[in-house]
């Protein structure tokens, strides 16, 4: 596992082909958190990746914004997103925003 970002309240790690967020994402850390993933995505040789937000327990649009930033880089670099995992609270928020198709089938939803 490689740590990309570490703060007492949230970390971003890479394990195999999965970018994982653990902890509560808040607005004060969002830019740095997103930038850590963007930097890694811009330099990775991987052609497929998964995102794991299953250990983000507080529903926050900030976490979804970080995901969108990472998805944008994946689209630019033609990196296929295989899976997106969300915690139950984050999943409910994503569903309210009508993002179910993106979460359930990212490869089909995002055309690179």
Image (tube, grey):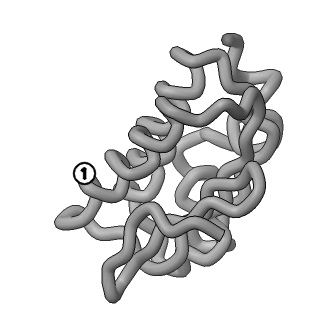
Q: Residue most toward the left?
A: 28
Alpha-carbon neighbours of circle 1 within 10 Å: few (<14), some, or many (≥20)?
some
Residue in view at x 41 percent, y 48 percent: 66
Q: Nearer the viewer, residue 109 or 42?
A: 42
* Residue 6 on image: x %, y %: 37, 75
Residue in view at x 48 percent, y 30 percent: 42
* Residue 17 on image: x %, y %: 75, 49
Q: Establish if 82 lies above or below 42.
A: below
Quarter of the figure with the C terminus = top right
Q: Is residue 91 visible?
A: no
Q: Establish if 110 lies above or below 89.
A: above
Q: Is residue 93 visible?
A: yes
* Residue 92 on image: x %, y %: 62, 63
Q: What is the quadrant of residue 55 in the picture?
A: bottom right
Residue in view at x 59 percent, y 72 percent: 89
Q: Residue most toward the bottom?
A: 8
Q: Establish if 59 lies above or below 9.
A: above
Residue at image mark 1: 31
Quarter of the figure with the N terminus = bottom right
Q: Is residue 19 left or right of residue 93?
A: right
Q: Is residue 112 left or right of residue 28?
A: right
């Amino acid at each position: 596992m490689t740590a990309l970002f570490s703060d007492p309240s949230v970390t971003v790690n890479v394990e195999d082909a999965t970018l994982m967020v653990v902890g509560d994402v808040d607005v004060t850390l969002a830019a740095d958190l997103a930038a850590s993933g963007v930097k890694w995505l811009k330099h990775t040789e991987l052609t497929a990746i998964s995102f794991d937000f299953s250990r983000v327990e507080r529903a926050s649009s900030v976490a979804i914004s970080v995901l969108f930033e990472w998805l944008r880089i994946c689209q630019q670099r033609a990196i296929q997103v295989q899976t997106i995992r969300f915690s139950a609270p984050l999943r409910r928020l994503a569903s309210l925003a009508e993002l179910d198709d993106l979460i359930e089938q990212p490869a089909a939803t995002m055309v690179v």
